[in-house]
Amino acid sequence: MAAIHPVFNHSTPTRQLHIITWGCQMNVYDSNRMIDLLRPLGYSVTPKAENADVLILNTCHIRDKATEKVFSELGRLKLIKELRLQNGYSTLIAVAGCVAQAEGKIILERAPYVDIILGPQTYHKLPKMILESSKKSGNIIEIDFPVESKFDFLPSTSEAPGQSAFLTIQEGCDKFCSYCVVPYTRGAEESRPVQAILDEAKHLCQLGVKEITLLGQNVNAYHGEGPQGSTWNLAKLIEKLSLIPNLLRIRYTTSHPKDMEDSLIEAHRDLPTLMPFVHLPVQSGSDKILKAMNRGHTSDDYRRLIDKLKRHKPDIALSSDFIVGHPGESVPDFQATIKLIEDIKFAQSFSFKYSPRPGTTAALSKNQISETEKDSRLKELQALLNDQQTQFNQQTIHKTLPVLFTHRGRKPKQIVGKSPFLQAVHITTDQNLIGQEKNVRIDECLTFSLSGSLV
Ligand code: 5AD
Ligand code: SF4
């Protein structure tokens, strides 16, 4: 039997699309945009890869064996593609995201059954690529950085994304930290125009969204085109967004300490919709390592910045990323990171073992740290960060916090939401409060969440 190609398969009312997303929140946003792009072509999302006419792997290249993970998943998808073909259905496999950008040609050599390779800046061309792929044999690859901005080609979301949504406002990075692939995979820093962001935010709120997290690799470096040729920074954009009726909460991530302008710190003091939480990665507490990382600030600069934030917003919760075992990191360097964490006290954090990334300067260094040493440093660091997270959560016991409820919990009558400090909070109630913000008294602190009761 001839295989039925997804695009021309009219025997089923809709075509099925399955996306596997790895990595950061921006990849989650991108995957949702790809769904929006394919919906007008009749595609709906299926949770089962076996049912999908189009399978998309949206990949991440930031750390560890990223490429190997992609090949192992592709092996599984290849079997699904073969099985479906035996049943008369063709399947299209697309690899998107940062691994596609960095290793696209290698993927096609090693996995020729992949039909489409597209980078993070070219996924607006996905519908055209699917159509082309259906007409000709061979693979299609789109990983050049295009002159046009993909944002100009993305349709607006038509399905309600829930109570809490991501909105990419800035992308790419010009900072070239020694260890990081982002400037190579996502390209140069680019900020979206103010009006496009306002339109998207208003549209999301019309669909029922109550909380928006503004995304960017360097979100606080945002400098988008405003009205009459002006340039707006993040504080000004947030101020404008905070006027949208029904938008209860605004967050932003990820920030760079060097771009933390006074106006943004003041916005935390002045705007009640801007949540009292900042993810501000410091990576290391050692000045020697910060310099080797090309971070452009010292550990004291970071401490001063945190002091300023706390002066303006005393209850602000802090979060950071840490890398242990960057090339050249000595035991005293690592201890300087521990000291910085002890001094500042984080509400939550992400921490990683340094992973050499192809094409980055740190990967070429002769002073690599052994895996065993990295393992033991990471263990020590994470124990401290976990303690601090527990302490932070425990401080909220018996306090009343506004919680925005977003989904049902696993237990009967349980609903789950977020505190302003990004803590998961669950309560048991008969009422349907999803999408609403309610005051909750915190009764108990569990490992990764809080439980409470309605006030
Ligand atoms: N190795 C380990 N961690 C890394 N990160 C980025 N690149 C690497 C790498 N090569 C971490 C940084 C960054 C976060 C998103 O990922 O801490 O802030
Ligand atoms: Fe990577 Fe550094 Fe840019 Fe962050 S600031 S995306 S760590 S290069």
Image (tube, grey):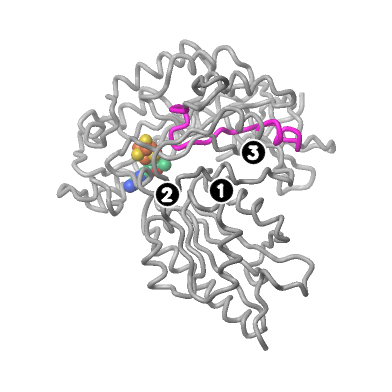
Q: Which residue is mark 3?
A: 165
The amino acid sitting under disc 2 is Phe
User: Which label number is shown at residue 145?
Assistant: 2
Q: Which residue is mark 1?
A: 30
Q: Which residues are magenta?
A: 201-222
The amino acid sitting under disc 3 is Ala
Residue 428 in the image: state x and y as whole percent.
76, 38
Compared to residue 74, the image places residue 365 above or below, namely: above
Compared to residue 117, the image places residue 119 above or below, namely: above
Q: Quadrant of the N terminus?
A: bottom right
Tell which circle, 1 or 3, labels the residue nearer the N-terminal end: 1
Q: Which quarter of the figure has residue 82? A: bottom right
Q: Element at badge 2?
A: loop
At 69% from the left edge and 59% from the top edge, which residue is drawn? 45
- Does the magenta-highlighted stretch encompass residue 220? yes
Q: Quadrant of ligand 1?
A: top left
Cα separation between marks 1 and 3: 12 Å
